[in-house]
Image (cartoon, helix red, strand yellow):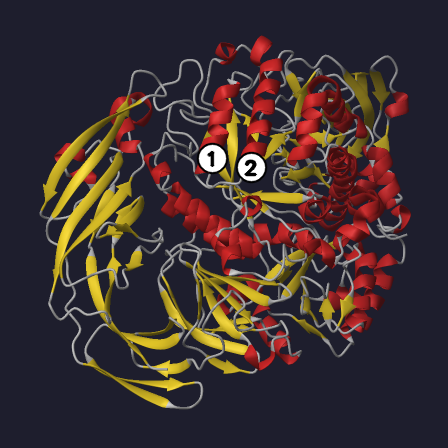
Amino acid sequence: MTRRSVLAAGLTTGVLAALGPAAEAAASPAASASAGSAPTASWFAAPARAVRPKFRWWWPDGLVDPAEIAREIDQMADAGFGGAEIAAVHHSISDTSVLDTAHHGWGSAPWRDGVKAALRQAARRGLTVDLTLGPSWPVAVPGVTPDDEAAVKELAYGKATLTGGAAFDGPVPAPVYAPASGVTVQKLFAVQAARVDTAYSSGKATGLDVDSVTDLTNRVADGNLSWTPPDSGTWVVLSYWQRGSGQQPEAGPHSSPAAYVIDHFSAAGTAAVTRYWDTAILDSTLRKLLKAAGGAFFEDSVELESKGLQWTPGLPDAFRAHTGRDLLPYLPAVILDNSNQVFAFEARLTQEIRHDFWETVSNLFNEHHLGALKKWAHGHGMKLRSQPYGLQTDAIASAAVLDIPEGESLGFKNLDDYRCLAGGRDMAGSRVLSCESGAYAGGAYNTTWDKFLRTMGGAYAAGVNQTVIHGFSYATAPGVSWPGFAAFSPYSGAPGYGESWGPRQPTWHHVADVAGYIGRVQQVLQSGTVRADVAVFRQTGYTATGIGASWLTSTGVPLGWTHQFLSGPLLDLPNAKVSGKRLAPDGPAYKALFLEGDFFYGSTPTLSLDDARKLLKFARAGLPTVLLGAFGQALTPGLPDDGETDELRALTAELLALPNVRNVTDKTLVGAAFAELGVTSDVSYSVSSTLLNAHRVTDDADFYYLCNGKHAETVKPPVAAIDHDVTLRSTVRGGAGTVPYLLDPWSGRVTRLARYTRDGDAFTFRVTLQPGETLVVALGRPGLFGNRDGNRPHAVATDADDALFTGGRLAVRASAAGTFTTTLSTGRKVTTKVAEVPAAVTPDRWTLSVDDWRPGADATSTEVVRHSLTLDALLPWSQIPELADVGGIGTYRTTVTLPKSWSSATGALLRLGSVTDTCRVTVNGVRLDPVDRVNPVVDLGGRLRKGANTLEIEVATPLFNRLRVSNPAVFGTAARQAYGLVGPVQLVPYVQRTVA
């Protein structure tokens, strides 16, 4: 009996059951088709609201005013954002009595009025509003008490040690820790005894002999037990107690009566949530508003907290159905004490038992929680978005259940955590992978958009294509200080998790530029279908672990390879088929499958019998497959049935004998194995690089997102600038006419790439990116974006600084005098002489006008004080006495006088150097395109003239320096931050000449 045979391949009660009858349709390529028709310039320049970034919108429960709610929706809309998620979060308020939960709690009439106001105004402005399923997190609703069937459960244990043959006679051992407050009922689940065997002890876990485990439950009478061990060894008598864990949502209470966390593994727990919404919240008006809105219900990460083992009464039956075995004899190996293992059997056996246990829990979570919530949400015209991790469950499989899986930049340790969720999303045929973005410890009022964009750059390359920004706080709450209510600050008396964005921030003056940038990136990354080079099969689908894939993560990614992670349940989805040597050929179209030992269980080379059959089927259909480790001696991840190991090894022997399968024992040989099988990446770099990439395909174009980014926030040394060749492959039918385009997500402009070489379907060009900087490239037919450059000859080489298409003609640029040779794609060589280029200019005198934001008459009012200075050198505000404690908006002005030789063929790049935080540039009264916050270099084009030119640079800063003095109790211990325009600012002229 295999691990899935009893449950009709197991997935029936997991992913497929959760997906419901629409599973096949949801997994079809049509579900991931390109939004709209062929892309146009406006498609990119003005992305729809649906793909624009959203905010996590924090409310102080129901203490909100509908008029203010509508005003805040307008603020988000006016700034170019696409929506918000309403969340009752107020960790900064230590005395929650001021929130009056009896009348203004979560779910109360004022809260519902606020939700209605948000939905109505969002509908007027074209925004989407999502709703969290309960106050704060984890999911909880009022009316559930700790002792209820629907409440979250734990299995606590008691222990008595017997030595030298001593008998046990007395009350059953009580739990080693008392129940949580409010828990009044605990039920004895079982009593057993086991002999201690220290040979099996591991860490803090006491070793036990599995064959000695004896069920004593039937010997218990009136709570007492009499039992004598059969020998003089050391024995333990164990009692197991089922009870509520008493967990409440974070920073509560949020309601009256108080809400308690529900059982995430039972139908009863989920029914408590849906019943409360249907009977206590969703009146006829809200039902209509939700159906019209088409948003999502949201659930935060599964942060169930218990001193014991997470439990549900149905677990023993589910374990028996899943494995064909009783759980009780193996229970000592899974019991927990404050997240620590208490007992262990022989090491391999312990691994097998724990694997089977948590796989059972995964199935219950997917079926009874995520699947049931998704079905209910659809009934209200909503989707389900969730962060399906936090426990030792298969988050990869959970991601396939959800309409919108979500990760987080705070809790995820590296990009492979996103790639796990992306595998589930794409194999299920869904479109969006969301991210809770930009939560930084201690980041309140000091988070810069520069930092935010550097964090998210890599996440987009790993599959994220929806940004839910952390966050936007409701304006006010009782007792808060300027600049208003902030959900996470103060946090334990210090600056909390940032950021509270909105009009309270000076950078909000420029935030539409950032919203436009993110929206354009997401427009591309939500189009068409994903392409990934390799599917990495995981025996255990945990995520938020930071554990990657051998060779691919460490070596392959720096060379251009892309990968995603799959777990066993995904192999049963309709999309799990091989055609043309590709797995999931309509997307993600994996070129190969990679399998290695299970990192979560000692890197043991394991494979379930059912998964082995699937991988063998895929390989027989032509899928190149590489295995790392001793898979000739493979073991099952869970406890095997009689003969199952031999059957597994017979299957792996067949697999390893196939000509399109390679088995290596050293991770450094994985790349060579792919090469032997003819597997290459869609993107390749000429050197090992920090460049990251994502590839999506529509009917009309290949889209490549490139970012010089980090694999993780903590990567050291920091990422450096890159300057090297990159090769991209065209996979869309376009023939010889295919041309590459550059899509600038800051300006929204689309231009044809002017300098590249082509070899068949491979396009090679130079990529130069600063740390965190991004580039979007499309390969498609001429004129795809309404571009006028058609299929004109391009440059394949030039010793000028740059080549570009402008006004339908090919031109080169030079920043110094000289004679330059350009080789065209026709083979013709063109010589360009540049006699003179004006010298670079470094402005040495500036006027600076600063609007200094200070506390006003109340917590939400801001007073602005104007400072006017003349600067002979650019310095951070912290080093300018008048500005040392200032946060606000500064306008720098200077005059640059250009020589009479300046002509229409002369332009200039304005290099701003260091600038914190956001900025905009105006030249001679004309405001230019948004400035790339990561690499602030602006092409001034033909906007300069001979003689005097006025440059104006407007800079907005965070408020931290002001808060250091206005609220020193919270912010005063930190040093001033360096804000403003620091430079060096340089005007670098160039001469541009047409060559074809």
Quarter-of-image position of residue 694: bottom right
Circle 1/circle 2 CB separation < 8 Å: yes
Q: Position of residue 858 (x, y in %)?
A: 33, 16
Q: Position of residue 602 (x, y in %)?
A: 65, 53
Give the side of residue 949 with respect to residue 198, left or right. Answer: left
Return the residue nearer the eye: 513 or 13: 513
Q: Quadrant of the C terminus?
A: bottom left
**Would residue 192 be seen by someone viewing this image from the given angle?**
yes
Residue at 31%, 27% (x, y): give it.
971
**Element class at badge 2:** loop
Residue at 42%, 49% (x, y): give it.
453
**Would residue 608 be seen by someone viewing this image from the given angle?**
no
What residue type is disc 1 on? Answer: Met
Q: Position of residue 148 (x, y in %)?
A: 76, 18
For marks 1 and 2 on the same chain, the one whose residue lies earlier in the sequence: 1
Q: Report which residue position mark 1 lands on.
A: 76
Q: Report which residue position mark 2 lands on.
A: 127
What residue type is disc 2 on? Answer: Leu
Residue at 67%, 34% (x, y): give it.
292
Classed neighbour count for the residue bearing mark 1: other residues with Cα under 10 Å, few (<14), some (14–19), many (≥20): many
User: Above or below — where is 415 with respect to 991?
Assistant: above
Q: Position of residue 421 (x, y in %)?
A: 63, 50
**Element class at badge 1:** helix
Classed neighbour count for the residue bearing mark 2: other residues with Cα under 10 Å, few (<14), some (14–19), many (≥20): many
